[in-house]
Amino acid sequence: MTQAIWGPVQQEMSDLLKRHPDDVPGVVDQLTKLQEVLCRVPPLLNSNPLADFNQLYLTITENVLERLYDGKFKDPGFLSRLDVEFAARYFDALRYWTDGSPACPGVWAGLFGRIPGPDARPLPSAVAGVNAHINFDLPFALVTTFDHLGTDPIDGSDQHHDYLQVNDIFNEEIPGLRRGYLDRWQLLIDTMNGELDDWWQGEMVEYTRNVAWRNSQKIWAIRHDMIALDKQRRRLDDTATGLGKLLLSPFADFLQ
Amino acid sequence: MASQGDDGPLVGRTDTLADIQSDLRNVGSGGTAAVFVTGESGVGKSRLLRETADALRETGFAVLSGTCLDIGDASPLHPVLQALRRHGGATNTTATSTAAAGADDAGALLDRVSHDLRAIAGDKPLLLVLDDLQWADRSTRQLLLYLLAGLGDVRISVLAAIRAEALHGTHPLRRVLAELRRLRSVRVVDLAPLNQDQTRELVTAIVGGNVAIEDADRVYKRSGGNPFVAEELARDLRDGQVELSDTLREIFLTRVDELPPNAHQVVHAMAAGVEPVDHAVLARVVKLPEDQLLEAIRVAVAHRFVSSDGDGYRLRHRLVAEVLEQEVLPAESAALHRRYAESLESEPGEPDHARLAHHWQRAGVPSRALPPVVAAARSAEAMYGFAEAHRYWSIALQLVSEDDADRTPLLGNAAESAHQCGEHLLALSRLEELAGRKDAPGQGDLHLRRARYLAAAGRTATAETEYELALESADCTPQLRASAAAFLAELLVQLARYADAHERAREALELAAVQGTTADLVRASAALGFSAAFREDPDAGLAVIRHAVEIAERSGHPDDLGVAYLHLAELLTGPLNSIEEGILVARRGAERLSTLGGGRAHQSRLLAIAANGLFRIGQWTEADAVLEAAMRHRPSGAEAVELLLARCRLLVGYGDLEDAARDLDSAATLLAGGGARHVLPMLTLRAGLAMWLGEHADARAAVQRGLTETRSDDLVLLGVLAWHGLRAEAEAHAAGKPVDQGAIRRLLMVRDRMASGAGNAGPAARAIIDAYLDLCAAELSRIEGRHDPEPWARAAAIWDRRQQPYPAAYARLRHAEASLQRKVRRAAAVTGLRQAYATATAMGARPFAAEIVGIAHRFRVVLADDMPTVPMSLPDQPVDELALLTGREREVLAAVAEGLTNREIGERLFISERTVGVHLGHIFDKLQVRTRVQASRVYLTAA
């Protein structure tokens, strides 16, 4: 028997993961449903690290969807495919974890493994998820999307422009998320140091997203070579796993 | 991959096996079905494939099996051609390969393979089993989608296995599976490892008798439920090896050590081979006397390393090969590969270039590897496997050093093949290297090629500069200059810079007239024609393109002719809105090409233009006939998608919703391989189909997805989507179902964007945008329950002006409905309703006609003298079906049954072609048929 990794919500989780959303509204819907289920995972309930990440991811994807409806992107076909392919990798990781499969990437396993505790701070937890998703999943999602659309990842292209626009969304959402978690006296400190910290996190996402773009260009060149690709995948997973551990360690409490 | 009869018990897969079989049998209306089994290595995919194949063979399936190779550079269509060869034996081998090599184009190749498959299947259902699909080349993936879309006209079920590990990264199959997953005819089975109980069952079955629970659980823990590993561990347990090995590697290394020397040698040799390894080849590699070799193989089989089937030997599992590969010393491995290569070369007949290249490369002898690599590249090109060819050219480059004279032509080939298979960045970097060589081609040539690659990569600004550099370079020959000027003009038209394009095209035409090829002339003329037409001088533009057609006619080359006709037909049906003439041109072009016997793809595209035009002007019967003819040409790729979408649109109009859904699924299957520009038409059709089925939520979802994928400057596409979206909400409202306020709010935003952007659009686009804006406004009044006839009247007028009877009649229906609801101007409403009804029946738009009848019934309107005002519920089989027809209609039907065209019927009966169409519409409606053939059948049976 597979152990009930998700405790009382095991069945709901595995039913939910049977769905494979194929458009951005579908992804938002899936993340919303996931959030509802994740908040019922004992013992930490609402405050488990994955729920923290999922909430952030949901907010960001809703923002992307709004911009798609508003016609803010130059190549919405590209961005929609990327968003779906990107999310599919998070859902895949959850699926592997739920099945107890060794195929679950290390960087995700690190975060999923912390769901039962010990309690981690919400912000570093959310950032740890962002780390897994951007440093590990994003480059591959980018390559798959470009491959499917039959275009190359080129600096300065419409697609690159749209890709960079998503950085703005991260920058908008992370400070908001941060304030949402703070209690009063922390808010005081935050008001004093807020700018600096916000800047630091904003930079981090922007920095890692640029790394992801560069990595995708690297992977693009070797995508037909399965052995080299596998090596690159392992390398990215290891790097991201290390960073993820750091973010979930007490050391990262200074973030919050 | 294990040999038959050597299998352990199959545990925990009974339900999966039954489901797979039933899915494969259930081919549905499309005539195809597919099951993709994914799972980690050793989880039992191949076993499942084998069991399923055996079961289906017993129930009357013809079964073909192929395995993809992991040498990463197999030849195009390898697994399918291998499956055909295995089935047909030696005689078929040559037949297949010559058939493949002699095809005129990629579509013809797919057609021939389908033909072979049909021949093998006969009247049996066909099962194609493909193992290790993760290693399939691009051509194989495309063939698979082609077959699953039903284009090969083969009733086929496909069962394929894919290693889950391969899908983690960026494997192209990842997206393909994601797209196929939602189709009714495709199932993706994710094969999970065994659970603890199942592992216990497996262990008990292998060990036989009592197994201590702790031992079984230890196996479960070590194997993680992987059946292959669990089986091997259980064997150790049975054989009394109490200490279970920790890894698969240890299990097999211990066993290798136990082998006698000769068998040991055979197993190591196998690890370096490409499976299946032929006995004669193995004999030359291992160099043992025949009897000792046979004995050694027998031992290797007994120790469960090697298995043997009709084609030769294989290692029992890829996992074994992977363990062994790491154990062979590099020098030893090189020597083995050299012997394989020499052995293959000593085989009589044409060697398998791909295999030969593989072995020479790994033998560390690049000079011997180069000729087979180049040969493999050329034969891949002959089979339109540009991606594979490109890989070979790249390998060839790795084999020659910097200062090798061969490098220059290889770079040229590598760049061009990269361009052909869409690897634009690589094409450009190869070209850079080529440009840096001492014996590089001339500057003009290099600039022109760079410009073409850049344009294909969408980097238009730099492409433009490069074209200009090509034109200015000193060594540019007159021919090159003509080409460069024509390409540049074409690019400028694409960028909508019509004034610049016009000037460039004029220059290009002058150059081409003196020194250029027909292709240059046609390209330059098209650029000139379109730029003139867009600059509001349509007559001049038309004249230029007509002239281009004449030039192409003189050259008689199918490609030139196809391109010229396409430009003319597109200009007429597009910006000039002379749809009938455009249709005529398109059909004439297709006919010309078919008499010349070439330009398949162009023929399909011309027929698609004709069919879409006929659909727009309401001549659906003719559109149906054109599409039927087009599908007989067996289109493939983007052309097939276009035709399928056109036919789907027609079927939705006819109310043949099951077949429409089938065509939509076929189009989606092809699009799973890529093709972004057809996604939106597909989503629009999905929404339209869902609306007729009363599935408003599905219609809404399709439209909303479309909105997230449409560029904000594609106002026409947005217009179609916004109308579909608002209509879906209006239909939901009318059906008493909830409307989605969020969706409406977004649709209104889109409408506002269209309204503010329409001013900047060209006149042709502006007219269409306005027409959709009217429809949107009208649907909105319906959603709000205002029953306002005014916007509908405007919409009807504007669609009348655009000569599109279907939307015009739709607007008339709604106009009448609103007027009748408000009880205003009943007489005008009744006339409008009757007019709409006449249009609907003439076209054969049955669900639409039924809706009109429904509304007529509700408001007690008599539609026509001979029509009862009840919803269409004709008796199932009237005694004399022809009794319903008028005298004139009988005459028309008699002529149809003779096989006359509308024009010929018109000439015989002294009526216009269009009147014939109207009569036909009535006939079809009364006889409840949809095609001329069906109508003729009714006539002949009744008469």
Image (cartoon, coloured by chain):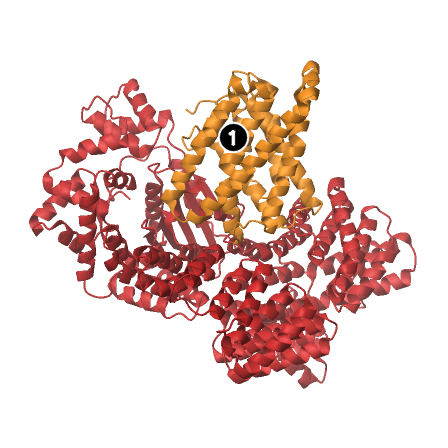
Query: What residue is at 49 percent from the left and 77 percent from the top?
Result: B477
Q: Is residue A250 above or below residue B392?
A: above
Q: Quadrant of the C terminus of chain B?
A: bottom right
The residue positioned farthest toward the right in the image shown: B824
Q: Is residue B819 left or right of residue B686?
A: right
Chain of the residue on which disc 1 is drawn = A
Q: Secondary structure at mark 1?
A: helix
Tally the marks.
1
Q: Is residue A175 left or right of residue B267?
A: right
The residue positioned farthest toward the top in the image shown: A185
Q: Is residue B618 visible?
A: no
Which amino acid lies under the numbered mark 1 shown in the image of this protein?
A: Ser
User: Residue B378 at what x, y percent from top left?
Assistant: 35, 65
User: Residue B209 at what x, y percent from top left?
Assistant: 23, 24
Q: Is residue B382 visible?
A: yes
User: Residue B100 at what x, y percent from top left?
Assistant: 36, 66
Query: What residue is at 75 percent from the left and 42 percent from the top?
Result: B739
Along the viewing direction, whichever of B530 and B597 lies nearer the viewer: B530
Q: Is residue B665 left or right of residue B873?
A: left
Query: What residue is at 33 percent from the left and 24 percent from the top?
Result: B221
Letter of the red chain = B
Q: Which residue is mark 1?
A: A14
Letter of the orange chain = A
